[in-house]
Image (spheres, grey):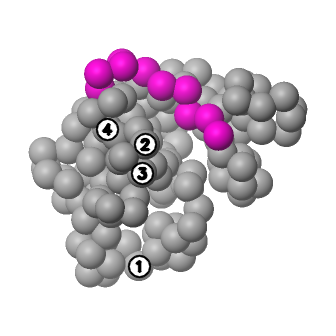
Amino acid sequence: MNYWLVKTEPEKYAWSDLERDTKTTWDGVRNFQARNNLQKMQQNDLVMYYHSVSEKSIVGVAKVSQEAYQDPTTQETQWVAVTLVPEQALAKPVTLEQIKKEERLQNIALLRQSRLSVMPLTPEEFDILLSMGQ
């Protein structure tokens, strides 16, 4: 199993939207590194759901229910999408400030590549973030 973090602006598609819809197509990614990460996602991988810009916090855990397929928002075949389903909301959001202060998370991609919208997490990083949200 692999672990990931995806970023979204809550004003565009919030965790509550994913819970309401019960699944979503994670599309519209137009960065090659983020696209490559989408291509590596496997069914049942777990995904931290991060609200960017206004909230800057992890609010839930989603699961990959369908692996990479042609992004339906474009005819360009180089872009892919995956389907995510909600797994669990975090009891409390894990803020970017908390992540920055956690010594064990100093190498997390969220801090090193802050503009990347789809990024891998190590199992240890995932577990730390999950425990911080309990």
Q: Which mark is residue 9?
A: 3
Residue type at mark 1 is Gln
| First to last magenta residue range | 19-28
Q: Nearer the viewer, mark 2 or mark 4?
A: 2
* N-term mark: 4 or 3: 3
Residue 16 in view (yes/no) = yes
Within 10 Å of the Cα at label 2, are there few (<14), some (14-19), or many (20+) other Cα atoms?
A: few
> How far from the left and from the top, in percent, is residue 123?
43, 53
Residue identifier under label 1: 106
Residue type at mark 3 is Glu
* N-term mark: 3 or 1: 3
Contact flag, marks 1 and 4 (Cβ < 8 Å) = no
Within 10 Å of the Cα at label 4, are there few (<14), some (14-19), or many (20+) other Cα atoms?
A: many
Residue identifier under label 4: 15
Contact flag, marks 2 and 1 (Cβ < 8 Å) = no
Q: Is residue 83 magenta?
A: no
